[in-house]
Image: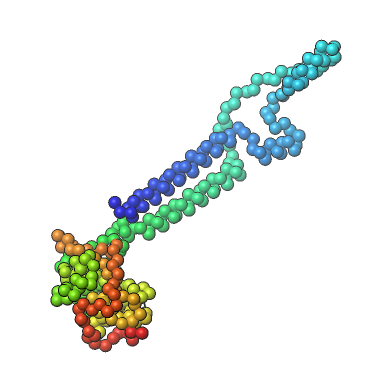
Amino acid sequence: MSSGQVLAIAIPVLIILVVTVGVVSMRRRDEAGLGRLSKETRARDVAAGLSVDDDVEVVSGREVERAAALERIGGTIEPVVAPSAPEPWSPPDLEALAVTRRQFLNRSSIGLMILGLSGFGAASLAFLWPKVAGGFGSKVNLGALSDVDAAIGGSQPAEGFSYFAEAQSYIQRYPAEALGAAETVYKENIFEGMRLGYVALWQKCPHLGCKVPACGTSQWFECPCHGSQYNRVGEKKAGPAPRGLDRFPIEIKDDGAFIVNTAVVVQGPVIGTNTTQQGLEGPHCTTGGH
Ligand code: FES
């Protein structure tokens, strides 16, 4: 199971746990507060000269002793009133209780926290969704090999170049006669695709990230931002870029599906690499090379 799938399961579970803990803690607070006077209420009662306890008249031990001593020496005393048995406590009806200011604030803050966490979880899921769903950032299926060949033969957007938006890549043919030179330059996962006759070039310029268009006249890729230029298989020819175009591994399944693995970005070849010896084939589309 990929890390994206693990996160996609873990985030909703975390949100459900937080909501459950929040609801349970609110219920406990409500029940723990039943039948008790709040600190503010008790302070108000004391200020008004009222007893802060229940309405049972309490006789202290000291008063009982004083009454007994007075009786022994013949003095008169007030009759000692024995406390009546307290009424058995029964919890009030939860529905009948109004929501206190403290409860309102507690519930509001927990509600806001849950809302924030839910938003964060939803944003994380949205961020991970393309990987889970097989979009850019994972293995992208471009369809049958014959369809990809037809698209390359149709040469869109410029003759000799074929762009596939779902993989943010140009799929270029790699000439068989250049394989000997390529074997010494490219990593195995890229060379494997070259052996099949293709290379998948990421559209993003390795200089500062502009999208690099193809130039139909020069038959190179030419970046409009600062003029970096690359030959038809993405090897750097001119400009400020630090290397050739980055690329993705390719695989062709037994059923003919053409897969570009956009989860693995392989850095372009170093400056000076020129495995195909492709020269300029016409005028540039940009001023280039500065
Ligand atoms: S971004 Fe392409 S040359 Fe600068």
Q: Does residue 61 appear in the picture of this structure?
A: yes
Q: Does residue 169 appear in the picture of this structure?
A: no
Residue 269 falls left or right of residue 49: left
Quarter assignment of residue 289: bottom left
Q: Nearer the viewer, residue 21 or 56?
A: 21
| Residue at 45% across, 42% down | 20
Residue 254 falls left or right of residue 71: left
From what the image shows, is residue 121 above or below residue 29?
below
Q: Position of residue 39 (x, y in %)?
A: 66, 38
| Residue at 20% across, 72% down | 184
Q: How many marks?
A: 0
In the rendered image, the residue lying farthest to the front is 184
Q: Position of residue 155 (x, y in %)?
A: 21, 76
The quarter of the picture where the C terminus appears is: bottom left
Quarter assignment of residue 257: bottom left
Q: Position of residue 29 (x, y in %)?
A: 55, 38
